[in-house]
Amino acid sequence: MFVSCAIFCELDRGTHRDTIASDFYELGVGRMDKLYDVQGAAEKLGGISISTVRAWLSRGRLARTKVGRRTMISESELERFVRQGQRKRTSDR
């Protein structure tokens, strides 16, 4: 990531700055997911209980991101989890 940032900063001085910035954005460089704590994730998933979210984290059904000592869940992980649940329900019919 450090190298990418150094390259981006160097290229930022050029004449094609806007094009380069959009290319880096499409590649995911400089893009950061919103992170939710366990309570925020529970609310985002429709108001389920915090203990349910913790159980899913423990079982590996949800991937955690550690920030210091805090357990966080990325927005893309919550979206993946919801999509995966929708696929299971439609295949059960």
Image (cartoon, rainbow, N blue to C red):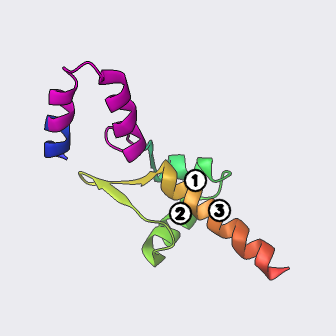
Q: How far apart are the alpha carbons under marks 3 and 1? A: 16 Å
Quarter of the picture holding the C terminus: bottom right
Residue 32 rendering spot, x and y as whole percentages: 38, 41
Instruction: Name the foreground residue: 60 vs 91.
Output: 91
The magenta segment is 7-32
Residue 22 rendering spot, x and y as whole percentages: 40, 32
Mark 3 sits on what residue? 83
Mark 1 sits on what residue? 42
- Residue shown at 20%/47% (left/top)? 1
- Outermost residue toward the bottom in this view: 92
Query: Image quarter for residue 29?
Result: top left
Instruction: Name the foreground residue: 14 vs 44.
Output: 14
Magenta residue check for 13 = yes
| Label 2: which secondary element | helix
Disc 1 and disc 2 in contact, CB within 8 angstroms: yes
Instruction: Name the foreground residue: 35 vs 5.
Output: 5
- Residue shown at 18%/20% (left/top)? 13
User: Few, some or many C-alpha atoms within 10 Å of disc 1 (few <14, some 14-19, many ≥20)?
Assistant: some
Disc 2 and disc 3 in contact, CB within 8 angstroms: no
Amino acid under disc 2? Val
User: Few, some or many C-alpha atoms within 10 Å of disc 3 (few <14, some 14-19, many ≥20)?
Assistant: few
> Could you tell me how many numbered marks the image carries?
3
Mark 2 sits on what residue? 53
